[in-house]
Amino acid sequence: MLTAGVDIGSLATKVVILEADSSRILASVCLPSGPRPAEARRAALAEALGAAGVVASDLAATVSTGYGREGLEHSQGSVTEISCAARGAHLLDPAVRTVFDIGGQDSKVVRLDEDGYPTNFALNDRCAAGTGRFLEVMAQALGASVEKLDDLAMSAESPVTISRTCTVFAESEVVGLLAREVEPSRIAAGLCRAVAQRTAHLAQQIGVQPTVMLVGGVGQNRAIATELQAVLQMELVVPEEPQLVVALGAAAIAAERRLAALETEAAQGGSGA
């Protein structure tokens, strides 16, 4: 059984083609969402199908999630990112009980049970502080890319304190620090520490239970992962491709839905006989 999970985020659109029986990822794609998310999701799905060597009709089910999850053609429904993050993390590591999902425009902390279903969550969706968009703006203020921001932070001897977490005010603070000739690496490290502290504060609302996994695009930032471990005083599991975990969860849920539908059809057929 082949299924697809499509995660349409504010900054990137991710697709995972899953061989449900073996839980093997056949193909995955991550493309910029751009100004036309509908076009991005069609392009990402087409590219993923091509990479897997299959066509749309080979898919038993498709589930979408993310900001643009509604209106996906041939989808068997949409699911919240919270459920998908939990299912994806569980598929990668059944020991996970807490998931930190830091994306382009929001951040989430999800508690899950031993079966990979969410039991509680905390969500920061009112401000871009501590998200991928926040890091993009800060990197631009430093005259660097987001990838370079991570390298700068990892090379710093010590982080400078960033007192503001609002994107607008933090950008002004960065400009002021540069004017005072503070080393960009120290500023980058301070920004990553600020993101980690804000995320840990969000997690206090529901508590953190190990094992902990960091997913989402920001999970690729080594400095933030290191700082978050230090704040939480516990080790984090970071998948090889953290930005794909939510799409993976959507694909897993698609398989569950299709199997449930087949069981219902079989039961109805049996009762009819």
Image: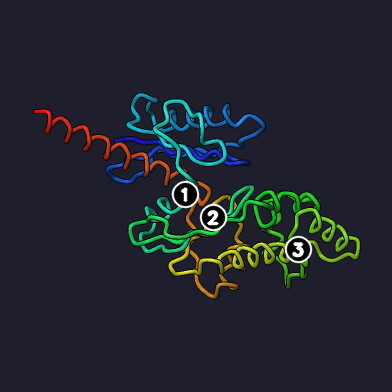
Q: Is residue 219 visible?
A: no
Marks 3, 1: nearer the viewer: 1
Mark 2 against mark 3, which lies toward the viewer?
2
Residue lying at 82% horizontally and 59% vertically, measured from the top left: 174
Q: CA distance from mark 3 to mark 1?
A: 30 Å
Against 45, residue 131 (above or below) is below
Residue density around tag 1, few if under 14, some if 14–19, many if 20 or more, within 10 Å? many
Residue beneath label 3, please? Answer: 185
Q: Position of residue 152 (x, y in %)?
A: 72, 60
Specify the amino acid type for callout 1: Val
Q: Residue at x 40, y 51 (%)?
A: 87
Residue 71: where, in percent of width, then height? 50, 29
In this rendering, position of residue 181 left or right of residue 83 = right
Q: Quadrant of the N terminus?
A: top left
- CA neighbours of label 2 inside 10 A, class few (<14), some (14 to 19), many (20+): many
- Residue behind mark 2: 101
Q: Secondary structure at mark 1?
A: helix
- Give me the residue at 42% from left, 26% from top: 74
- Give the residue number, with chain letter if any, for mark 1: 245
Residue at image position (51%, 52%) is 242
What amino acid does circle 3 point to? Ser
Asked if the residues shown at circle 1 and circle 2 are in contact, with their CB atoms under 8 angstroms apart, the answer is: yes
Let me know if residue 244 appears in the view. yes
- The answer to whether the residue labelled 3 contacts the one labelled 1, judged by CB atoms less than 8 Å apart, is no
Circle 3 packing at 10 Å, graded few (<14), some (14-19), many (20+), is many
Residue 136 sits above or below residue 12 on the image: below
Q: Secondary structure at mark 3?
A: helix
Going from the N terminus, do you reach mark 3 or mark 1 first?
3
- Tally of numbered discs: 3
Helix, strand or loop for disc 2: strand
| Residue 205 quadrant | bottom right
